[in-house]
Structures are given as C-alpha cells and as structure tokens.
Amino acid sequence: MGSIRPGYIKNAARKLMQYYEDEFTTDFETNKRLVEQYTDVKAKSVRNRIAGYMVRLVRQRIADEEVEATQSGEEVTDDTEY
C-alpha cells in the first residue's frame, strides 16, 4: 500500500504542471531542480515530495496520451530504453 500525499503537495504540483507543463519530465532529479527554481519552498523534504509527485503526474499524462492515440487508431512507438 502506498503513502497518501497531503493536499498541499498535490496542489503545488498540479499548479506547477498547469504553468510549466512541457518542462517537467519523468526524471526526479530534473524535476527537483525545476521545483526549486519555480517555487519558494524552503524545506528540502517538501521540495522532494513535490518533485516525486510531478514524476507521477507526467507518467500519468504520457499513459493517457498513449491510450488516446491507440483509441484513435494511431500507432504508438515506444522509444523507452529499459
């Protein structure tokens, strides 16, 4: 069972996604620096939790786009390296 994130973490992450949607990635380290740059969060733990939730939001957005692409008949190419 996963942990439940507080509302202030989710609200901050969603607001950042609204303003800077194309800049965040699935890379935690990149998101951590972007959260530090775009917010005035002083606590490192809060910054990291926001950045972690951003990774989840970006992955969900990518998954939603893939589902929409398959439903519309487009071919989905997965260039992800494992």
Image: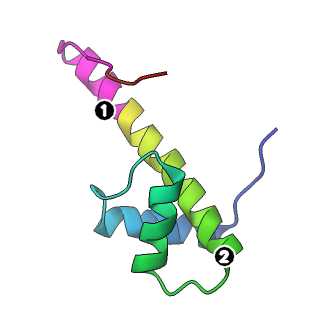
The picture places residue 4, in percent across and down from the top left corner, at: 75, 54
Q: Around disc 2, counting alpha carbons within 10 Å, would you say few (fewer than 14), some (14 to 19), or many (20 or more)? A: few
Q: Is residue 24 above or below residue 79?
A: below
Judging by the rendered image, the residue that carries numbered circle 2 is 44
The picture places residue 25, in percent across and down from the top left corner, at: 39, 49
Instruction: Say which amino acid is labelled 1.
Output: Glu
Q: Around disc 1, counting alpha carbons within 10 Å, would you say few (fewer than 14), some (14 to 19), or many (20 or more)? A: few
Q: Is residue 46 above or below residue 39?
A: above
Q: Is residue 55 magenta?
A: no
Magenta span covers which residues? 64-78
The structure residue drawn at horizontal position 32% and vertical position 25%, both measured from the top left corner, is 66
Q: Is residue 74 magenta?
A: yes
The picture places residue 60, in percent across and down from the top left corner, at: 45, 39
Find numbered disc 1 in the image and state the secondary structure of the residue it sits on: helix
The structure residue drawn at horizontal position 45% and vertical position 58%, both measured from the top left corner, is 30
Label 2 or label 1, whichever lies nearer to me, is 2
Q: Is residue 39 above or below residue 28?
A: below
Mark 2 → mark 1, Cα distance in angstroms: 32 Å
Which quarter shows the N terminus? top right
Judging by the rendered image, the residue that carries numbered circle 1 is 65
